[in-house]
Image: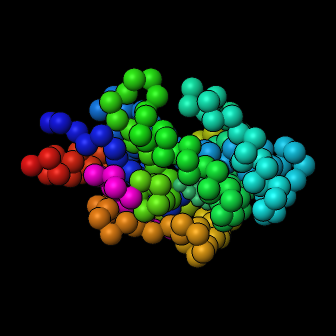
Amino acid sequence: MTAPRLITVDGPAGAGKGTLARRLAAHFKYAHLDTGKLYRAVGLNTLARGQDPSNPADATAAARALDAAAIARGGLENPELAGDTAASAASKVAAIPEVRAVLLSFQRDFAANPPGAAQGAVLDGRDTGTVVCPDAPVKFFITASAEERAKRRHKELLDRGETSIYPRVLADMKERDVRDSTRAIAPLKAADDARTIDTSEMDADAVFAAALAYIAEYND
Ligand code: C5P
């Protein structure tokens, strides 16, 4: 099958969009950009400078200080980016229009010129199909109930040997959902032409199979 050159995967935290995006990228040998990591890097950068992620001037300066070239070479591997401090700071800087503007051009450039001589790109995040690449030929919106997403996150933390209290994880998840879906700029929502997959009752293999089936259908 000839695959579409650009695939976007959006959805709330913990729904499985990152896993699907990585698998699609590996399958088609495409470059993959986890756009959440850009916002996480800006959030952590702001905190590292001793500044406030909710403050537009602070967060925008931290976004401008990101080294786009280093990121395109795979420089988003800092394990701290996966933590809850980064997640919470990310959702604060993500509500600031200037921060989104700085990151928008980087994301569009990645999609148009995937690094490493890849023939295509897979972007995952919250607005990659609605704002970053509205013309992407194939878009997915991956979702699941807040309870199921919190359950997965709770298990992941316990498996990593960290302390986790389920009601707390669920409350954090809901708080971030509200912040992401009610913000004025680029709120989390499915693109009109996205294929929505609810993963509440599906494992990663079933989600991947459903996505490949949809891509095959797109090619027909
Ligand atoms: O996907 P992840 O949990 O890493 O995203 C962290 C935060 O970054 C999200 O809660 C959201 O506020 C923000 N984000 C965004 N737009 C994207 C990707 C992430 O606003 N495309």
The residue shown at (62%, 56%) is 101
Magenta segment boundaries in residue numbering = 134-147
Picture quadrant where residue 23 is located: top left
131 with respect to 95 (left or right): left
Which x, y percent locates residue 118?
Answer: 37, 27
Which x, y percent locates residue 30?
Answer: 36, 32
Picture quadrant where residue 97 is located: bottom right
Q: Nearer the viewer, residue 86 or 99?
A: 99
Q: Is residue 188 visible?
A: yes
In this rendering, is residue 40 above or below 70?
A: below
In this rendering, is residue 128 above or below 119?
A: below
Picture quadrant where residue 71 is located: top right
Which x, y percent locates residue 40?
Answer: 67, 48
Name the image quarter holding the N terminus. top left
The residue shown at (34%, 35%) is 120
Which x, y percent locates residue 48?
Answer: 84, 43
Q: Is residue 172 visible?
A: no
Total count of labels: 0
Does the magenta portion include 158?
no
Point out the quarter of the image occupied by ligand 1.
Answer: bottom right
The residue shown at (29%, 61%) is 195
The residue shown at (68%, 56%) is 99
User: How are the residues colored?
Assistant: rainbow
Q: Residue furthest left?
A: 220
In this rendering, is residue 117 above or below 123?
A: above
Does the magenta portion include 136?
yes
Q: Residue furthest top?
A: 116
173 with respect to 15 (left or right): right
Q: Nearer the viewer, residue 70 or 19?
A: 70
